[in-house]
Image (cartoon, helix red, strand yellow):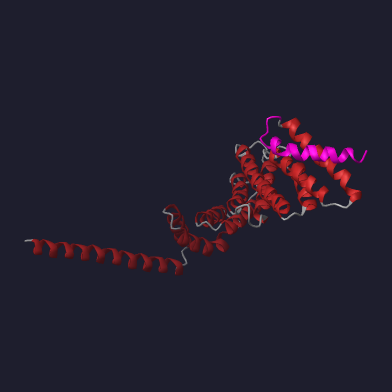
Amino acid sequence: MKFVYFCAMIKKMLFVGFILVSMVFTSCSNYNKLLKSTDNETKFEAAVDYFERKDYNRALELFDLLQAAYRGTAKGEDISYYTAYCYYNLKDYTVASYYFKRYVQSYPKYARAEECLFMSAYCYYLDSPRYSLDQTNTYMAISELQLFTDTYPNSERVAEANELIDNLREKLELKHFRISIMYYRMRDYMAAITSFENLLKNYPDTERREEILQYMTLAYFEFAENSIPEKKRERYESAVEAYNNLLYLYPESEYLADLKEIDTKARQLLESYQ
């Protein structure tokens, strides 16, 4: 009985497999016929159907074939819109951004233009790499998101766009901060100081200000220690100033105890210049 049951199951599985393979071949055959067809209306309906079924590669191939035939028409607008989303759903964000932007340029007065301008910028956002890599796409994303908020200041998406910009600026700030620390650890104190100062200038609301002031105190002091006599005084003064700023802004800072000895030594050395 077990053997008979086993054979029956094998036959059933083979039959189901045969049906599935047949369906695949039939589907491929029908699709190939569709590609060669001159019936653009059928192609369009099939492309939309493929899109809705998330078969974006087939949908995209059909939309590409139809673009020239429907350029400047209502269906042409649909094709441009669907094409952008095909690339977006395939996670090809660079190309998707291009097509979203092209939609806006081709159909600036259409209702979907606002959505597509946002999506063009959002694709750059998704393509923004981790902070340690080249940040060209990050700067592009900020620029494009800012363009969106300027173009549609009353859009419901403005708050989201601003939040995305904040996320991107945080990434740029982190990259700048890590570079500044790198200079300090390399003992290139002049570069470190300049980098930290620019960091405070470019990101005045940074949550890293306390840590930056700590590094600036250390960097100015080490810079003074390694300077020619004519430059020591002003650099010790800068170290004391950085320490005082830290003390004023963060009187409970955990860094103050470690820096106190440096501040005291800098003040004593400054007294010798009186």
Which residue is at a point 76% across and 30% down the rendered structure image? 248
Query: Which residues, given as a range, are shown in magenta?
Result: 251-274
Residue shown at 41% from the left, 69% from the top: 32
**Residue 185 percent location from the top left of the image:** 70, 53
Does the segment drawn in magenta span residue 1? no
Q: Position of residue 10 (x, y in %)?
A: 17, 65
* Residue sitting nearer the eye, 16 or 274: 274
Q: Is residue 274 left or right of residue 120?
A: right
The front one of 219 and 139 is: 219
x then y, percent, for residue 214 = 72, 41
- Give the total of numbered labels: 0
- Viewer-proximal residue among 94 and 58: 94
Left or right: 110 with respect to 262? left
Q: Is residue 266 above or below residue 20?
A: above
Q: Main secondary structure of the magenta part?
A: helix
Q: Residue at x 75, y 38 (%)?
A: 261
